[in-house]
């Protein structure tokens, strides 16, 4: 792993599906999920060539938003789009230090409460820059969503299931409560942010964007 003068931590390769699976089925060989990934240098060079300081963009997510929105050509070349997506994801991890990279059907950065597909957000910034404040509101709600997530998980873990009288140990009179039901009652929990949309506290912040 390498370090960078732009992001405060070591840089890791983009996690693959196998690496993300270790979050569900950990093994002796499992590694900690990455906070920052490599592969963003072409975007940093592009920013310098465009008279922007990548160090500022790395620490100011909304300066980065404005820069991306002003440079739609970032979507023209796949290599540059990939580099910009990685830079954006790392910047999100700076703004929300608990966020980590993962691979689902596409690269995402987030926590168990919210997860953001960076390529989709990059495109949404270019195509819908007016949604800047909605994205800011979503980010502002993220710490509370994480707290709700921890509380919900603790409640589910410590929930006491009483054994009715006259029933053998291990026999239930009804199906056990699905902890997911409890979690879904808590606003903002287990939210995976779909492409071009941000949801928070159980409501849609952006409307009318393409899926």
Image (cartoon, rainbow, N blue to C red):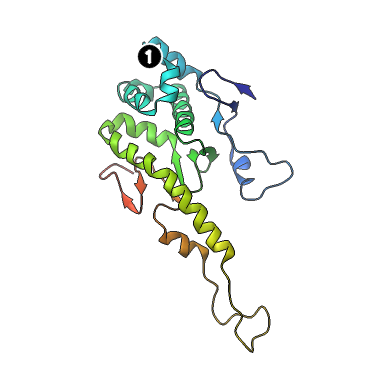
Q: Quadrant of the N terminus?
A: top right
Q: Residues within 10 Å of mark 1 (few under 14, many from 20)?
A: some
User: Which residue ends up furthest to the right in the rendered image?
Assistant: 28
Residue 188's x, y, as percent?
40, 52
Residue lying at 50% horizontally and 44% vertically, measured from the top left = 111
User: Which residue ends up furthest to the bottom in the rendered image?
Assistant: 166
Q: Could you tell me how many numbered marks the image carries?
A: 1
As drawn, 94 above or below 205: above
Res 172 seen here: yes
Residue 146's x, y, as percent?
47, 48
Q: Is residue 54 left or right of residue 155?
A: left
Q: Quadrant of residue 127?
A: top left
Q: Which residue is mark 1?
A: 52
Front one among 72 and 163: 163
Q: Is residue 211 left or right of residue 3?
A: left
As drawn, 45 above or below 89: above
Residue 199's x, y, as percent?
35, 47
Q: Quadrant of the C terminus?
A: top left
Residue lying at 30% horizontally and 34% vertically, measured from the top left = 132
Q: Is residue 67 left or right of residue 103?
A: left
Res 106 seen here: no
As drawn, 45 above or below 115: above
Secondary structure state at the residue bearing disc 1: loop
């Amino acid at each position: 792993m390498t370090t960078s003068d732009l992001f405060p931590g070591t840089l890791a390769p983009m996690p693959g599906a196998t690496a993300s699976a270790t979050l569900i089925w950990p093994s002796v060989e499992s590694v900690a999920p990455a906070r920052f990934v490599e592969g963003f240098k072409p975007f940093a060079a592009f920013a310098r060539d465009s008279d922007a300081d990548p160090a500022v963009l790395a620490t100011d997510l909304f300066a980065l938003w404005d820069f991306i929105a002003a440079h739609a050509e970032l979507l023209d070349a796949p290599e540059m789009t990939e580099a910009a997506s990685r830079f954006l994801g790392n910047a999100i991890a700076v703004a929300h230090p608990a966020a980590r990279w993962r691979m689902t059907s596409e690269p995402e950065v987030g926590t168990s409460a919210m997860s953001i597909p960076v390529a989709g957000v990059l495109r949404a910034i270019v195509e819908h820059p007016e949604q800047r404040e909605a994205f800011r509101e979503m980010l502002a709600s993220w710490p509370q969503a994480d707290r709700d997530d921890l509380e919900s998980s603790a409640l589910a873990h410590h929930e006491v299931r009483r054994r009715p009288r006259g029933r053998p140990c291990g026999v239930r009179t009804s199906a056990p409560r699905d902890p997911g039901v409890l979690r879904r009652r808590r606003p903002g929990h287990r939210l995976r942010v779909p492409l071009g949309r941000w949801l928070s506290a159980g409501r849609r912040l952006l409307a009318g964007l393409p899926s």
